[in-house]
Image: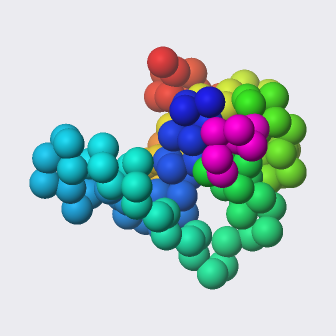
Amino acid sequence: RSDVWSCGVIVLEALRGQQLFDKAMSFIQQVELICTGALPPPPDETSDAACGFLALCLCSRQRRAGTEGLLGSTWLQDELSAVDTPHITLARWLKLLILWGKGCVSERVERRAFQGSRNEFEG
């Protein structure tokens, strides 16, 4: 379930456009921030469905959704259904989301990713 929490952190970072734990000066300090620090809220314009997805990921370990719960979430289903190709996978979509958050995605890469080009985001 820590992978689910990490997925939530990655999505939150992409939505906010910044890393959440980049203030740490050392690995130990980063671990302390992760274990004890409160996460910032998503941006105000974040949809209710996306906030629901984050809640599934970032809650306590006992209440945290499994991968099946994430795959069935309204936000993820809406996002995946907006893609016009059957070749997109969750892993490719998450990689693209990370690149968007970093402002690294060009129009060419976006187009190729959503047209099912397997060499850009496979792995």
Query: In this rendering, does residue 29 appear at all?
Result: yes
Query: In this rendering, does residue 115 appear at all?
Result: no
The stretch drawn in magenta includes residue 3: no
72 with respect to 99 (left or right)? right
Residue at (39, 49) in percent of width and height:
34
Closest to the observer, 5 or 77: 5
| 2 versus 36 height, above or below | above
87 with respect to 98 (left or right)? right
Residue at (74, 43) in percent of width and height:
63
Residue 32 placed where, x, y %?
Answer: 30, 49
Which secondary structure is most common in the magenta stretch? loop
Closest to the observer, 70 or 116: 70
Image quarter hosting the N terminus: top right
Residue at (51, 40) in percent of width and height:
6
Q: Quadrant of residue 115?
A: top right
Residue furthest to the left in view is: 25
Residue 92 placed where, x, y %?
Answer: 58, 31
Residue 93 placed where, x, y %?
Answer: 61, 38
Number of numbered discs overlaid on the protein picture: 0
| 49 versus 76 height, above or below | below
Residue furthest to the bottom in view is: 44
In the image, which residues are magenta?
Answer: 59-65
Residue 123 placed where, x, y %?
Answer: 48, 18
Residue at (57, 41) in percent of width and height:
5
Closest to the observer, 92 or 64: 64
5 with respect to 67 (left or right)? left
